[in-house]
Image (tube, rainbow, N blue to C red):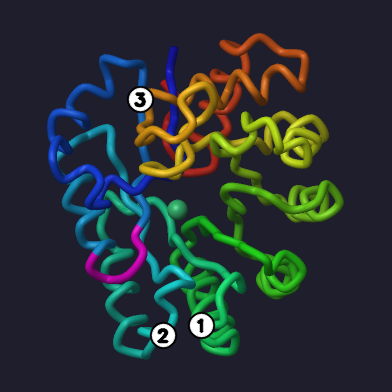
Amino acid sequence: MRLFDTHAHYDDPAFDADRAALLEALPGRGVAHVVNMGCDPASSRTAIGLAETYPWIHAAVGLHPENAGQFSDAVLAEIRELARHPRVLAIGEIGLDYHYPTPEREIQRAAFRAQLALARETGLPACVHSRDAHAETLAIISEFPEVRGVVHCYTGAREMAKELTDLGWYIGFTGIVSFKNSKKARLVAESLPCDRILIETDCPYLAPEPLRGRRCDSSMLPYTAAAVAAVRGMETQALIEQTYQNACRFYGLDPD
Ligand SMILES: [Zn+2]
């Protein structure tokens, strides 16, 4: 079994007590690769530090929409500089989050556009967060036809997922796809071309059933894989291997 956790936050304080022991144990639990997101310049630097310490961890660098209030030319320049590091595989986590009134939507859109332009400039894929902003996320993504990316923790409609995969984008599923009330996510998982599906933890949050509510880590990915495999009528092992191949293609890693 080779698991690829395409989206994680091991820099989160939830891992402070046992981070090193947990990360060192991952390969023994079938986890071959993890991409740790950056949510601002500081956490992007932490992600790179983790990637320098553990060969199975890789980094993404970016400014999360929740932190878009920090957006400035200086912050963008810092992320651009960090993106040059050889262990950085993507620009992320970027996107739009309209769940709360702040940061203002205008600055979120500016930060998102600037970082999609950075993805275009660097040739790196984009890891996109979209919450209560699906139509606008798709509209802005469409302005950057040269950029490949994933909409992670996908909770949108099937129609939009199809538009994204038609653009060459990927769809990421967290433990949410295993939750009882997540029929919509399962309908999307059922409908996608098999080469566009990624699985992820978004840990420390969103542990899949039957572990829901616990602190999540990459070793729990088989439960998420099982939920996706079930709706597609596949064996879990086959889904795990398919998504491993997809993630290697997406992040530009050699699958062997
Ligand atoms: Zn995330």
Q: Secondary structure at mark 2?
A: helix
Q: On screen, 59 above or below 26?
A: below
In this rendering, is residue 143 above or below 29?
Answer: below
| Range drawn in magenta | 38-42
| Disc 1: residue Cβ within 8 A of ligand 1's nearest atom | no
Disc 1 target residue: 102
In the structure shown, which secondary structural element does the residue marked by tag 3 occupy? Answer: strand
Gap between marks 1 and 2 measured at Cα: 8 Å
Residue on which disc 2 sits: 69
Residue 56 percent across, percent down from the top left: 27, 32
Whichever of labels 1 and 3 marks the residue nearer the N terminus, that label is: 3
Nearest to the eye among marks 1 and 3: give it.
1
Most foreground residue, 109 or 245: 109
| Residue 199 position in % (x across, y down) | 55, 34
* Mark closest to the chain's N terminus, 2 or 3: 3
Amino acid type of disc 2? Gly
Point 68% across, 50% down: residue: 155
In the rendered view of the protein, which quadrant contains the N terminus? top left
| Label 1 vs label 2, nearer the camera | 1
Image point (71%, 13%), residue name: 234
Residue 38, percent from left and from top:
34, 60
Marks 2 and 3 sit apart, C-alpha to C-alpha, by 35 Å
Q: What residue did someone put label 3 on? A: 32
Neighbour class for label 2 at 10 Å: few (<14), some, many (≥20)? some
Residue lying furthest right in this view?
159
Q: Is residue 187 above or below residue 221?
A: below
Contact between marks 1 and 3 (CB within 8 A): the answer is no
Asked if the residues shown at circle 1 and circle 2 are in contact, with their CB atoms under 8 angstroms apart, the answer is: yes
